[in-house]
Image (spheres, rainbow, N blue to C red):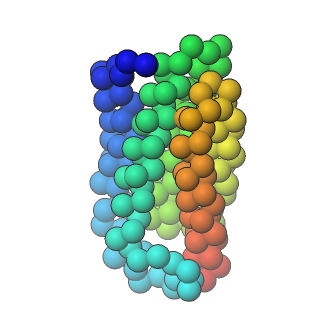
Amino acid sequence: MKIQWKSLLWNLALPLLTGGLAALLTAHSMKQFEQLNQPFFAPPGWLFPVVWTILYLLMGVSAYLVSTADSPYRLTALRLYGIQLAVNFFWPILFFRMQAFLGAFFWLLLLWILILAMIVLFYRVKPKAAYLQIFYLLWVTFAGCLNLAIAILN
């Protein structure tokens, strides 16, 4: 399969720009976050941007694989991808900016369901694309546990 560079670059840029904008909008909230009561399993703050950058790159590669595949499920899968990316964008705003910890937890549950549905659709289009999203689902599962613990502790 020949790489379609414009499509690959667009698909990599979209989640990175979405995550970057969310990070920009919540940048000053990290000091407040560090002052919250944290559960024992909370990772250090520097880990979050590292993990999210990797996850956004994996999302981009997955979306590229789906967008270049020949499948009747392709457009539906890409629409769901866009919806989950939009839901993903708003979670840090709810959690960090608004400090709506419990609301952010339920928003994250919605995101988790959307990611799972996206994985199922991606699998129908291109199994490799689905496998790349398993790390994303696992991280959001962990983030949900962390989010709920912070909501309880604060």
Q: Measured along the vertical axis of the image, is residue 116 above or below residue 129?
A: below
Q: Is residue 71 left or right of residue 33?
A: right
Q: Is residue 2 visible?
A: yes
Q: Quadrant of residue 51?
A: bottom left
Residue 89, position as x, y percentages in the image: 46, 47
Q: Measured along the vertical axis of the image, is residue 145 above or below residue 5?
A: below
- Tag count in the figure? 0
> 5 or 95: which is nearer to us?
5
Residue 119, position as x, y percentages in the image: 64, 38
Residue 47, position as x, y percentages in the image: 39, 68
In the image, what residue occupies the spot 31% across and 29% down?
Answer: 9
> 96 or 78: which is nearer to us?
78
Q: Is residue 53 left or right of residue 95?
A: left
Q: Measured along the vertical axis of the image, is residue 138 above or below residue 8?
A: below
Residue 21, position as x, y percentages in the image: 33, 47
Q: Is residue 107 left or right of residue 64?
A: right
In the image, what residue occupies the spot 36% across and 22% down?
Answer: 3
In the image, what residue occupies the spot 49% across and 35% down?
Answer: 62
Q: What quarter of the picture does the C terminus occupy?
A: bottom right
Q: Is residue 22 visible?
A: no
> 9 or 147: which is nearer to us?
9
In the image, what residue occupies the spot 43% across and 19% down?
Answer: 1
Residue that lies at the very extreme toward the front in this rendered image: 1
